[in-house]
Image: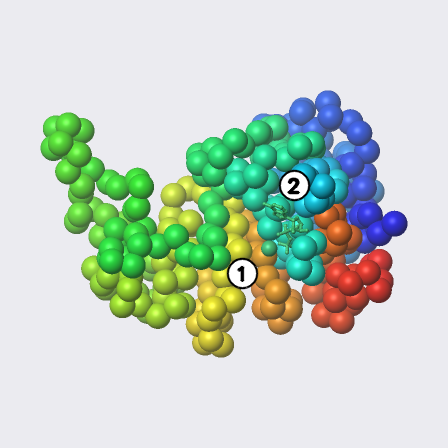
Amino acid sequence: MTNDQGAPRHDRAAETPDPSAIGALSGDRRHEASASSEASAAPSATAVAEREPILRARRLVKTFGRVVGLDGASLELYPGEVLAVIGDNGAGKSTLIKCLTGAEIPDEGEIWLEGERVAFKRPQDARDAGIETVYQNLAVSPALDVASNLFLGRELRKKGILGSVFRVVDQKGMRQRARDELSALGISTLQDVTVPVENLSGGQRQAVAVARAAAFGSRVVVLDEPTAALGVRESNQVLELIRQLRDRGIPVILISHNMPHVFDVADRIHVQRLGKRAATITPQTHSMTDAVAIMTGAATE
Ligand SMILES: Nc1ncnc2c1ncn2[C@@H]1O[C@H](COP(=O)(O)OP(=O)(O)O)[C@@H](O)[C@H]1O
Ligand SMILES: [Mg+2]
Protein backbone atom coordinates (compact mmCIF):
# COMPACT_ATOMS: atom_id res chain seq x y z
CA MET A 1 0.00 0.00 0.00
CA THR A 2 2.60 2.47 1.05
CA ASN A 3 5.35 0.55 -0.62
CA ASP A 4 7.84 3.00 -2.03
CA GLN A 5 5.13 5.47 -2.87
CA GLY A 6 7.23 8.29 -1.58
CA ALA A 7 10.50 7.23 -3.11
CA PRO A 8 12.00 9.55 -5.70
CA ARG A 9 11.23 8.55 -9.22
CA HIS A 10 14.69 7.19 -9.87
CA ASP A 11 14.07 4.61 -7.12
CA ARG A 12 11.10 3.17 -8.86
CA ALA A 13 12.82 3.15 -12.21
CA ALA A 14 15.75 1.34 -10.68
CA GLU A 15 13.51 -1.28 -9.17
CA THR A 16 12.12 -2.39 -12.47
CA PRO A 17 13.65 -5.85 -12.76
CA ASP A 18 16.66 -5.50 -14.98
CA PRO A 19 19.59 -7.11 -13.19
CA SER A 20 21.80 -6.99 -16.25
CA ALA A 21 21.65 -3.23 -16.29
CA ILE A 22 22.81 -3.11 -12.70
CA GLY A 23 25.56 -5.62 -13.31
CA ALA A 24 26.89 -3.43 -16.09
CA LEU A 25 27.09 -0.41 -13.86
CA SER A 26 30.72 -0.53 -12.94
CA GLY A 27 33.88 1.29 -13.81
CA ASP A 28 33.85 3.84 -16.58
CA ARG A 29 30.41 3.00 -17.81
CA ARG A 30 28.77 3.85 -14.55
CA HIS A 31 28.33 7.50 -15.24
CA GLU A 32 27.10 7.02 -18.78
CA ALA A 33 24.66 4.29 -17.82
CA SER A 34 23.24 6.21 -14.90
CA ALA A 35 22.84 9.31 -16.99
CA SER A 36 20.73 7.48 -19.53
CA SER A 37 18.72 5.32 -17.16
CA GLU A 38 17.99 8.19 -14.85
CA ALA A 39 17.49 10.92 -17.36
CA SER A 40 13.90 11.19 -16.22
CA ALA A 41 14.75 11.54 -12.54
CA ALA A 42 12.98 14.40 -10.86
CA PRO A 43 15.27 17.42 -10.54
CA SER A 44 14.11 17.86 -6.95
CA ALA A 45 15.84 14.62 -6.07
CA THR A 46 19.08 16.65 -5.99
CA ALA A 47 22.37 15.97 -7.68
CA VAL A 48 23.14 12.86 -5.67
CA ALA A 49 20.25 11.01 -7.27
CA GLU A 50 21.81 11.36 -10.70
CA ARG A 51 24.65 9.11 -9.69
CA GLU A 52 24.78 5.42 -9.02
CA PRO A 53 24.23 4.40 -5.42
CA ILE A 54 27.41 3.42 -3.61
CA LEU A 55 25.35 0.97 -1.55
CA ARG A 56 22.01 -0.48 -2.50
CA ALA A 57 19.63 -2.97 -0.94
CA ARG A 58 16.96 -4.42 -3.17
CA ARG A 59 13.86 -6.02 -1.73
CA LEU A 60 15.45 -7.61 1.30
CA VAL A 61 13.39 -10.15 3.20
CA LYS A 62 14.35 -11.38 6.65
CA THR A 63 12.17 -13.47 8.90
CA PHE A 64 12.77 -14.67 12.44
CA GLY A 65 10.58 -17.74 12.73
CA ARG A 66 7.13 -16.30 12.19
CA VAL A 67 8.18 -12.72 12.81
CA VAL A 68 8.83 -10.69 9.70
CA GLY A 69 11.76 -8.36 10.24
CA LEU A 70 12.09 -7.17 6.64
CA ASP A 71 9.37 -7.50 4.06
CA GLY A 72 10.98 -6.43 0.81
CA ALA A 73 13.06 -3.50 2.03
CA SER A 74 15.06 -1.42 -0.42
CA LEU A 75 17.52 1.35 0.32
CA GLU A 76 19.98 3.42 -1.69
CA LEU A 77 22.94 5.34 -0.35
CA TYR A 78 24.52 7.80 -2.78
CA PRO A 79 28.06 9.12 -2.78
CA GLY A 80 28.49 12.29 -0.79
CA GLU A 81 25.35 12.07 1.28
CA VAL A 82 24.14 11.53 4.80
CA LEU A 83 21.15 9.19 4.64
CA ALA A 84 19.08 9.00 7.81
CA VAL A 85 17.01 5.91 8.55
CA ILE A 86 13.98 6.53 10.72
CA GLY A 87 10.96 4.47 11.70
CA ASP A 88 8.91 3.29 14.64
CA ASN A 89 10.12 0.57 16.97
CA GLY A 90 9.91 -2.74 15.18
CA ALA A 91 9.87 -1.17 11.70
CA GLY A 92 12.99 -3.10 10.76
CA LYS A 93 15.66 -0.40 10.93
CA SER A 94 18.14 -2.49 12.86
CA THR A 95 17.50 -5.58 10.79
CA LEU A 96 18.00 -3.61 7.59
CA ILE A 97 21.27 -2.17 8.85
CA LYS A 98 22.41 -5.55 10.13
CA CYS A 99 21.87 -7.04 6.68
CA LEU A 100 23.91 -4.23 5.12
CA THR A 101 26.73 -4.69 7.61
CA GLY A 102 26.94 -8.47 7.68
CA ALA A 103 25.43 -8.97 11.12
CA GLU A 104 22.37 -10.70 9.63
CA ILE A 105 22.02 -12.63 6.39
CA PRO A 106 18.86 -11.77 4.45
CA ASP A 107 16.60 -14.64 3.33
CA GLU A 108 15.94 -12.93 0.02
CA GLY A 109 16.98 -9.85 -1.90
CA GLU A 110 20.22 -8.35 -3.09
CA ILE A 111 22.90 -6.05 -1.76
CA TRP A 112 25.11 -4.11 -4.16
CA LEU A 113 28.25 -2.18 -3.25
CA GLU A 114 29.64 0.13 -5.93
CA GLY A 115 27.97 -1.83 -8.70
CA GLU A 116 29.00 -5.25 -7.43
CA ARG A 117 26.73 -7.76 -5.81
CA VAL A 118 27.91 -8.68 -2.33
CA ALA A 119 26.84 -11.37 0.13
CA PHE A 120 28.22 -10.73 3.59
CA LYS A 121 28.29 -13.70 5.93
CA ARG A 122 29.69 -11.92 8.95
CA PRO A 123 30.43 -8.34 10.03
CA GLN A 124 34.10 -8.74 9.12
CA ASP A 125 33.09 -9.35 5.48
CA ALA A 126 31.34 -5.99 5.35
CA ARG A 127 34.24 -4.34 7.10
CA ASP A 128 36.71 -5.82 4.64
CA ALA A 129 34.56 -4.39 1.86
CA GLY A 130 34.80 -0.92 3.41
CA ILE A 131 31.54 -0.72 5.39
CA GLU A 132 32.34 0.44 8.91
CA THR A 133 29.66 0.35 11.57
CA VAL A 134 29.56 2.16 14.87
CA TYR A 135 27.11 0.24 17.01
CA GLN A 136 25.09 1.82 19.74
CA ASN A 137 26.97 0.01 22.46
CA LEU A 138 30.29 1.50 21.55
CA ALA A 139 33.01 -0.85 20.51
CA VAL A 140 35.74 0.99 22.36
CA SER A 141 38.01 -0.52 24.99
CA PRO A 142 37.88 1.79 28.02
CA ALA A 143 41.25 0.87 29.48
CA LEU A 144 43.16 1.49 26.25
CA ASP A 145 44.25 4.92 25.16
CA VAL A 146 42.75 6.83 22.24
CA ALA A 147 45.42 5.82 19.73
CA SER A 148 45.20 2.13 20.64
CA ASN A 149 41.43 2.23 20.28
CA LEU A 150 41.71 3.75 16.84
CA PHE A 151 43.95 0.90 15.73
CA LEU A 152 42.27 -1.90 17.65
CA GLY A 153 42.50 -5.09 15.60
CA ARG A 154 44.73 -3.52 12.97
CA GLU A 155 47.71 -2.26 14.89
CA LEU A 156 50.61 -0.84 12.99
CA ARG A 157 53.71 -3.01 13.40
CA LYS A 158 57.27 -1.85 13.54
CA LYS A 159 59.19 -2.05 10.32
CA GLY A 160 61.36 -5.07 9.56
CA ILE A 161 61.74 -8.25 11.56
CA LEU A 162 60.55 -6.68 14.80
CA GLY A 163 57.14 -6.14 13.29
CA SER A 164 56.85 -9.01 10.87
CA VAL A 165 58.14 -11.74 13.16
CA PHE A 166 57.86 -10.41 16.69
CA ARG A 167 54.67 -8.42 16.03
CA VAL A 168 55.97 -5.41 17.93
CA VAL A 169 53.47 -2.58 17.56
CA ASP A 170 54.60 0.79 16.29
CA GLN A 171 53.28 2.86 19.19
CA LYS A 172 54.81 6.09 17.95
CA GLY A 173 53.52 5.62 14.43
CA MET A 174 50.03 4.85 15.67
CA ARG A 175 49.98 7.91 17.88
CA GLN A 176 51.09 10.16 15.07
CA ARG A 177 48.57 8.69 12.68
CA ALA A 178 45.84 8.96 15.35
CA ARG A 179 46.61 12.68 15.77
CA ASP A 180 46.50 13.14 12.02
CA GLU A 181 43.15 11.38 11.69
CA LEU A 182 41.56 13.28 14.55
CA SER A 183 42.71 16.64 13.30
CA ALA A 184 41.62 15.80 9.75
CA LEU A 185 38.17 15.21 11.20
CA GLY A 186 38.30 18.47 13.09
CA ILE A 187 38.22 16.71 16.47
CA SER A 188 40.03 19.28 18.55
CA THR A 189 38.92 18.12 21.99
CA LEU A 190 41.11 15.04 21.80
CA GLN A 191 44.58 16.45 21.57
CA ASP A 192 46.13 13.85 23.83
CA VAL A 193 45.84 10.45 22.17
CA THR A 194 47.60 8.74 25.10
CA VAL A 195 44.64 9.28 27.46
CA PRO A 196 42.72 6.10 28.33
CA VAL A 197 39.28 6.19 26.75
CA GLU A 198 37.62 5.59 30.14
CA ASN A 199 38.67 9.11 31.10
CA LEU A 200 36.79 10.65 28.18
CA SER A 201 33.28 12.06 28.09
CA GLY A 202 30.52 10.23 26.23
CA GLY A 203 30.83 12.55 23.27
CA GLN A 204 34.57 12.11 23.09
CA ARG A 205 34.19 8.34 23.17
CA GLN A 206 31.68 8.55 20.39
CA ALA A 207 34.16 10.72 18.49
CA VAL A 208 36.83 8.05 18.91
CA ALA A 209 34.45 5.40 17.61
CA VAL A 210 33.50 7.54 14.61
CA ALA A 211 37.11 8.45 13.90
CA ARG A 212 37.99 4.79 14.07
CA ALA A 213 35.28 4.01 11.54
CA ALA A 214 36.48 6.80 9.28
CA ALA A 215 40.18 6.18 9.56
CA PHE A 216 40.75 3.13 7.45
CA GLY A 217 39.75 3.92 3.94
CA SER A 218 36.15 3.08 4.58
CA ARG A 219 33.70 3.54 1.75
CA VAL A 220 30.60 3.78 3.93
CA VAL A 221 30.11 4.55 7.62
CA VAL A 222 26.99 3.37 9.44
CA LEU A 223 26.10 4.99 12.76
CA ASP A 224 23.43 3.47 14.98
CA GLU A 225 21.90 6.08 17.29
CA PRO A 226 25.19 7.90 17.84
CA THR A 227 23.67 10.72 19.85
CA ALA A 228 21.25 8.67 21.96
CA ALA A 229 23.31 8.84 25.14
CA LEU A 230 24.74 12.33 24.67
CA GLY A 231 23.96 15.80 25.91
CA VAL A 232 23.26 18.74 23.64
CA ARG A 233 26.81 19.99 23.20
CA GLU A 234 28.22 16.52 22.65
CA SER A 235 25.45 15.66 20.23
CA ASN A 236 26.29 18.73 18.21
CA GLN A 237 29.92 17.66 18.07
CA VAL A 238 28.92 14.25 16.75
CA LEU A 239 26.62 15.83 14.17
CA GLU A 240 29.49 18.04 13.09
CA LEU A 241 31.65 14.95 12.81
CA ILE A 242 29.08 13.34 10.56
CA ARG A 243 29.24 16.39 8.29
CA GLN A 244 33.01 16.15 8.28
CA LEU A 245 32.83 12.55 7.18
CA ARG A 246 30.50 13.42 4.36
CA ASP A 247 32.69 16.34 3.32
CA ARG A 248 35.66 13.99 3.23
CA GLY A 249 33.75 11.91 0.72
CA ILE A 250 32.52 9.16 3.03
CA PRO A 251 28.77 8.68 2.78
CA VAL A 252 27.02 8.02 6.08
CA ILE A 253 23.94 6.05 7.08
CA LEU A 254 22.56 7.47 10.30
CA ILE A 255 19.96 5.55 12.28
CA SER A 256 18.30 7.90 14.72
CA HIS A 257 15.16 8.50 16.70
CA ASN A 258 16.02 12.13 17.13
CA MET A 259 14.05 14.08 14.53
CA PRO A 260 15.83 17.41 15.05
CA HIS A 261 19.19 15.69 14.63
CA VAL A 262 17.97 13.87 11.54
CA PHE A 263 16.60 17.02 10.00
CA ASP A 264 19.72 18.92 10.94
CA VAL A 265 22.25 16.64 9.29
CA ALA A 266 20.57 14.35 6.74
CA ASP A 267 20.53 14.99 3.01
CA ARG A 268 17.84 12.37 2.55
CA ILE A 269 15.68 10.43 4.97
CA HIS A 270 14.67 6.81 4.47
CA VAL A 271 11.42 6.13 6.33
CA GLN A 272 11.07 2.50 7.31
CA ARG A 273 7.65 1.13 8.16
CA LEU A 274 6.38 -2.43 8.62
CA GLY A 275 9.56 -4.00 7.32
CA LYS A 276 9.97 -1.91 4.20
CA ARG A 277 10.62 1.55 2.92
CA ALA A 278 7.56 3.73 3.11
CA ALA A 279 9.23 6.74 1.51
CA THR A 280 12.47 8.58 0.99
CA ILE A 281 12.10 12.25 1.79
CA THR A 282 14.34 15.28 2.28
CA PRO A 283 14.43 18.01 4.92
CA GLN A 284 13.70 20.48 2.12
CA THR A 285 10.51 18.84 0.92
CA HIS A 286 9.08 17.47 4.17
CA SER A 287 8.64 18.65 7.75
CA MET A 288 9.23 16.62 10.89
CA THR A 289 5.46 16.32 11.22
CA ASP A 290 5.30 14.91 7.70
CA ALA A 291 8.01 12.42 8.56
CA VAL A 292 6.18 11.23 11.67
CA ALA A 293 2.97 10.89 9.68
CA ILE A 294 4.71 8.63 7.17
CA MET A 295 6.35 6.65 9.98
CA THR A 296 3.01 5.95 11.60
CA GLY A 297 1.13 5.31 8.39
CA ALA A 298 -1.06 8.40 8.68
CA ALA A 299 0.38 9.66 5.39
CA THR A 300 2.10 7.94 2.52
CA GLU A 301 4.31 10.76 1.37
N1 LIG B 1 16.85 -11.70 16.40
C1 LIG B 1 15.52 -11.55 16.32
N2 LIG B 1 14.69 -12.55 16.67
C2 LIG B 1 13.35 -12.41 16.58
N3 LIG B 1 12.75 -11.31 16.13
C3 LIG B 1 13.51 -10.27 15.78
C4 LIG B 1 14.94 -10.34 15.84
N4 LIG B 1 15.45 -9.15 15.41
C5 LIG B 1 14.38 -8.40 15.09
N5 LIG B 1 13.22 -9.07 15.30
C6 LIG B 1 11.88 -8.55 15.04
O1 LIG B 1 11.89 -8.00 13.74
C7 LIG B 1 11.12 -6.80 13.74
C8 LIG B 1 12.00 -5.65 13.32
O2 LIG B 1 12.91 -5.40 14.37
P1 LIG B 1 14.06 -4.31 14.30
O3 LIG B 1 14.80 -4.44 13.02
O4 LIG B 1 14.85 -4.43 15.54
O5 LIG B 1 13.22 -2.96 14.30
P2 LIG B 1 13.68 -1.49 14.69
O6 LIG B 1 15.16 -1.46 14.74
O7 LIG B 1 13.11 -0.62 13.62
O8 LIG B 1 13.05 -1.19 16.00
C9 LIG B 1 10.53 -6.66 15.12
O9 LIG B 1 9.24 -7.25 15.11
C10 LIG B 1 11.47 -7.45 15.97
O10 LIG B 1 10.84 -7.94 17.12
MG1 LIG C 1 16.46 -1.07 16.34
Q: Residue at x 40, y 68 (%)?
A: 203
Q: Is residue 42 visible?
A: no
Give the crowd class for mark 1: few <14, some 14-19, many >=20 residues within 10 Å. Answer: some
* Kind of residue at badge 1: Glu
| Numbered disc 1: secondary structure | loop
- In the image, residue 235 lies at what x, y percent? 48, 70
Q: Position of residue 58 (x, y in %)?
A: 70, 37
Near-viewer residue (120 or 51): 120
Left or right of 51 on screen, residue 101: left
- Amino acid at the residue labelled 2: Phe
Q: Is mark 2 within 8 Å of ligand 1?
A: yes
Mark sitting on residue 64: 2
Judge from the rendering whether residue 258 lies leftward or rightward of residue 39; answer left or right.
left
Q: Quadrant of ligand 2?
A: bottom right
Q: Which residue is mark 1?
A: 225
- Residue furthest to the bottom in view is 232
